[in-house]
Amino acid sequence: MIPNMIQRASPNFNDRQLPIGILVLHYTGMTSGAEAIDWLANPESGVSAHYVVAEDGQVLQMVDEAKRAWHAGRSWWRGVTDVNSASIGIEIVNPGHEYGYVPFPAPQMDAVHALVADITARHAILPANVVGHSDIAPARKEDPGELFDWPRFARAGLAASPRPCMDPNWQDMGFMAALGRYGYDVFAPLEAVIAFQRHHRPARFDGVIDAESRTILRGLLLAEGL
């Protein structure tokens, strides 16, 4: 377990209906960490998370992993519609796009890395199932956003990493079919492409299906044996 972790119980949880197989990363998207933690602990908010990671790396546990925290909302990943039941949620303190999105400090990223490594090892969560809120709810969410260092987690085997491959030259409909096969909800196609790019090609997430996007997606499918 993570050393020096502190507790702040949230009443916002219920029983799981599915085994744990997904880890969802969020940013808090509020003006301060204290405000976010108070909101997650407020019984009137209807939201919670298992963990919160502060800018200085302090880890706070709010919901026991055995329980279903309310962090994912209306979401979908690889056919799972009750993502809350199947996942552990980590909130990373950051004001987010609405309040002045900033890079994640090194101590915070180190703590998130250690926490993700611990959780994925204990629950045997596959790297491709370590996802952002925007991956599971592309029409609603942007977090943890383009400044989150996904490559660091991929290099450590803690998040998806595409295999080298050539551009498959799919037409746009073929790309969307492949994106759905990989695990995204493609009901809102543009938003799904943007979410995919924000995670896997953050330098440009314009929703345009180009050669680089096709190649990355094909590499991810190859890595998954899909």
Image (cartoon, rainbow, N blue to C red):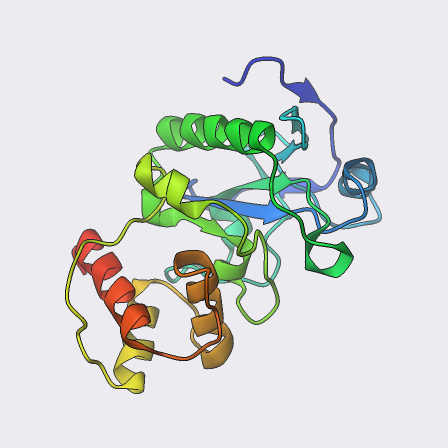
Comparing 119 with 97, the one in front is 97
Comparing 53 with 101, the one in front is 101
Whether residue 9 sits left or right of residue 52 in the image: it is: right
Q: Is residue 63 visible?
A: yes
Q: How far across and down, in percent of the image, does residue 169 sit?
A: 19, 80
The quarter of the image holding the C terminus is bottom left
Vertical side of 141 occupied by 1: above or below: above
Vertical side of 195 occupied by 83: above or below: above
Comparing 197 with 5, the one in front is 197
Q: Is residue 188 visible?
A: no
Quarter of the figure with residue 10: top right
Please count the marks in the image. 0
Write the residue at 39% across / 39% down.
153
Vertical side of 101 occupied by 184: above or below: below
Q: Residue furthest top?
A: 4
Vertical side of 76 occupied by 171: above or below: below
Q: How far across and down, in percent of the image, does residue 200 sit?
A: 39, 58
Whether residue 200 sits left or right of residue 103 in the image: it is: left
